[in-house]
Amino acid sequence: MIVLTDRLSLIADNIPRGDRVADIGTDHGYLPLYLIENNLSPKVILTDISKGSLSKAIENGNRLFPDLHIDYRIGDGLEPLDKGEVDTVVMAGIGGLLTIDILDWDISKALSFKRYIFQPRNNSGMLRRYLLEQGFTIEKNLIVPENKRYSEIIVATPPVDYQGRYSVDTIQNIELDFPESLGEKVTGFEADYLKNAIEIENSILEKIIANQESEDSSSAQNSIAFRKGRIARLQAFLDKHIT
């Protein structure tokens, strides 16, 4: 029996029953194997960049389902998939910039799938900007704790009729780093995430203030204002949870 972590469980909860699923960079393969075990998906594809990387998933699959043919594929990003071959593509534990590179490598293929579930390890704001530029609709921004840190999960759907890149220059980075949904109670972990994020921003702010004498004064003041703006936005979201 496969028991998922809270992070993978939340991803699984956002995969519609009956969807064909590809797990890019599957690692141990726990998520797709869970979908098989619980009859949640009629087709799963487990991919990773090398035979060595994929070996852990193959070992687990052979142990759990020795008589079942499971579709393992070696390749980089979306390369192992055919256009429209699955409904939902999962990219979990991959950096935001690398995720952008994977999508941009063949945007026509990237747009051929119905749904994506991203769990970027970093640069989530930059990933959101890229998605909006490509016409994606961001359906959900979710927060879940794991191993003393918080993971962001982004559920997004590609445009039905791709018109090329959209301009999103009017959207500020802070709005993408900390979307409005953080002010809403969705997973129940938002308040703790916000408190943690405020602590991190305050720690960075204190270091900037302590070192401002050794830096260009205008640059230091801009950095201070930038951090204070982020803290203010986070605090405003937190206040919604408190009141």
Image (cartoon, rainbow, N blue to C red):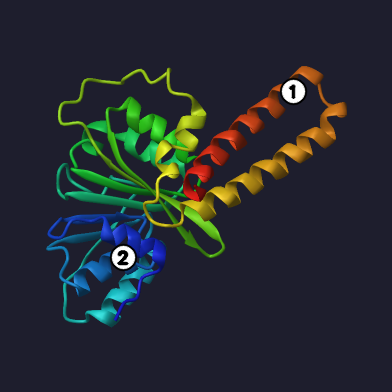
Q: Amino acid at mark 2?
A: Leu
Nearer the observer, disc 2 or disc 1?
A: 1
User: Residue 188 falls in which quadrant of the image?
Assistant: bottom left
Between residue 77 and residue 204, name the one nearer to us: 204
Residue found at x 34% / y 75% = 3
Number of numbered discs on residues = 2
Disc 2 is placed on an element classified as helix
Q: Amino acid at mark 1?
A: Gln
Q: Residues within 10 Å of mark 2 (few under 14, many from 20)?
A: many
User: Residue 6 falls in which quadrant of the image?
Assistant: bottom left
Q: For this view, does 60 lie left or right of residue 189?
A: left
Disc 1 is placed on an element classified as helix
Q: For this view, does 18 lie left or right of residue 142?
A: left
Q: List the single residue furthest toward the right.
A: 213
Q: For this view, does 212 lie left or right of residue 114?
A: right
Residue found at x 55% / y 40% = 234
160 is higher (above) or lower (below) than 164: below
Q: Position of residue 56 (x, y in %)?
A: 38, 70
**Mark 2–mark 1 CB contact (< 8 Å):** no
165 is higher (above) or lower (below) than 131: above
Residue found at x 37% / y 56% = 25
Q: Position of residue 155 (x, y in %)?
A: 30, 45
Q: Earlier in the sequence, mark 2 or mark 1?
A: 2
| Quadrant location of the N terminus in the rendered image | bottom left
Q: Residues within 10 Å of mark 1 (few under 14, many from 20)?
A: some
**Tag 1 residue:** 221
Q: Position of residue 199 (x, y in %)?
A: 65, 48
Residue found at x 26% / y 55% = 14
**Tag 2 residue:** 31
Q: Position of residue 166 (x, y in %)?
A: 31, 20
User: Residue 54 falls in which quadrant of the image?
Assistant: bottom left
